[in-house]
Image: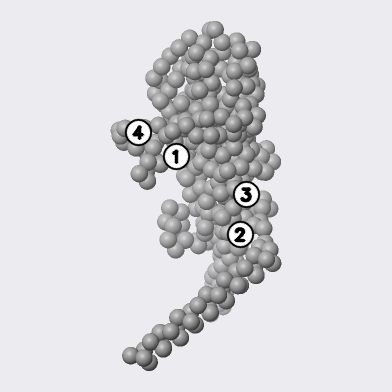
């Protein structure tokens, strides 16, 4: 009898701890940054994070890909290519509503490129489609050409991208063998662009840019302007918004409730004015409902 009571008590304590962990997880509302390694897609990384958190919170057999009836709302603030690594900003709970500003905000990248070879994806994962000489390119000429790509510029997004055509990602359509036309050039902003190393055929550049910018397109356009071709070998996002790679990006071994609690930047609390507007809308809806009900009653009585 004593053993049975002890077992029931242990189960009760375990369930209480699980409920507490899940409640803590569901109370998260804000944004934080994680480190994305090379290889997986941004969506894959997000699902791995979600699964780890749900498992720690005691959710049995969590399936992060099922969106319906999920006890956790989570999203990321800007896709990183599979071959890229670095800062991936994550929104959780009400923090997912803050991700739009992260998409449009400033980002910093470090890119290592290779001159003389162009690929269909504009990075090392693609097939080589062109080779050109690069012996004529000097460090001075390279740095001078960078000036043309600073400020407000026009840029054509890569074919292999997360942009969509008819509701499907262009990169997926291309892998299925379908023909895809390039999107028209669009305005983008480059706040700073500098050469960190020049050891032909390799070079390293640092870029700070606004939303909608593709470093792969930059490297491709830059090489063409130098009468050659190039592709990206490595790409690292070193900063997004206020989150830096060195100070804020949590590596996978720190994807825990405790670490995220410490790293979370909470959502700003709604102002009194915002609350008043919300209350006024609620009152207006109530009055409108009453009016409709009154009119319906009157119409019934007339008939």
Q: Nearer the viewer, residue 262 or 102?
A: 102
In this figure, which residue is indicated by the disc labeled 4?
180
Q: Nearer the viewer, residue 292 or 241?
A: 292
The colour scheme applied to this rendered structure is one colour
Residue 32 — which label? Answer: 3
Q: Earlier in the sequence, mark 3 or mark 1?
A: 3
Q: Are marks 4 and 1 in contact (CB under 8 Å)?
A: no
The span from disc 4 to disc 2 (Cα, nearest Å) is 41 Å
Residue at the (56%, 29%) spot, across then down: 153
Q: Residues within 10 Å of mark 4 (few under 14, many from 20)?
A: few
Q: Quadrant of the C terminus?
A: bottom left
Q: Earlier in the sequence, mark 3 or mark 4?
A: 3
The span from disc 3 to disc 4 (Cα, nearest Å) is 35 Å
Q: Earlier in the sequence, mark 4 or mark 2?
A: 2
In this figure, which residue is indicated by the disc labeled 2?
28
Furthest-bottom residue in view? 301
Q: Tell me the mark number nearer the camera, choosing from 3 and 4.
A: 4
Q: Look at the numbered disc 1 and give the secondary structure of its residue.
A: loop
Q: Nearer the viewer, residue 203 or 47?
A: 203
- Give the image location of residue 263, x and y in percent: 67, 50
Residue at the (49%, 18%) spot, across then down: 224
Residue 174 picture quarter: top left
Q: Earlier in the sequence, mark 4 or mark 1?
A: 1
Q: Residues within 10 Å of mark 2 (few under 14, many from 20)?
A: many
């Amino acid at each position: 009898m004593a053993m049975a009571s002890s077992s029931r008590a242990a189960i009760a304590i375990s369930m209480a701890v699980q409920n507490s962990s899940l409640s803590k997880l569901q109370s998260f509302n804000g944004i934080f940054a994680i480190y994305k390694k090379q290889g997986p897609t941004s969506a894959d990384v997000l699902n791995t994070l979600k699964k780890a958190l749900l498992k720690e919170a005691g959710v049995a057999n969590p399936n992060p890909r099922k969106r319906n009836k999920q006890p956790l709302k989570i999203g990321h603030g800007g896709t990183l290519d599979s071959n890229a690594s670095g800062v991936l900003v994550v929104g959780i709970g009400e923090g997912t509503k803050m991700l739009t500003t992260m998409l449009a905000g400033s980002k910093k990248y470090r890119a290592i490129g290779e001159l003389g070879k162009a690929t269909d994806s504009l990075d090392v994962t693609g097939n080589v489609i062109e080779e050109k000489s690069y012996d004529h390119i000097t460090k001075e000429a390279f740095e001078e050409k960078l000036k043309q790509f600073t400020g407000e510029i026009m840029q054509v997004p890569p074919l292999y991208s997360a942009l969509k055509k008819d509701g499907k990602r262009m990169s997926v359509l291309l892998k299925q063998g379908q023909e895809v036309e390039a999107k028209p050039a669009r305005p983008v902003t480059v706040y700073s662009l500098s050469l960190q190393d020049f050891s032909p055929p390799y070079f390293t550049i640092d870029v700070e840019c606004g939303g909608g910018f593709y470093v792969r397109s930059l490297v491709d356009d830059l090489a063409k302007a130098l009468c050659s071709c190039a592709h990206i070998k490595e790409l690292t996002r070193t900063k997004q918004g206020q989150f830096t790679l060195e100070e804020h990006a949590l590596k996978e071994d720190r994807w825990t409730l405790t670490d995220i609690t410490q790293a979370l930047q909470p959502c700003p609390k709604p102002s009194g004015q915002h609350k008043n507007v919300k209350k006024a809308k609620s009152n207006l809806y109530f009055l409108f409902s009453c009016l409709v009900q009154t009119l319906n009653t009157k119409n019934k009585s007339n008939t």
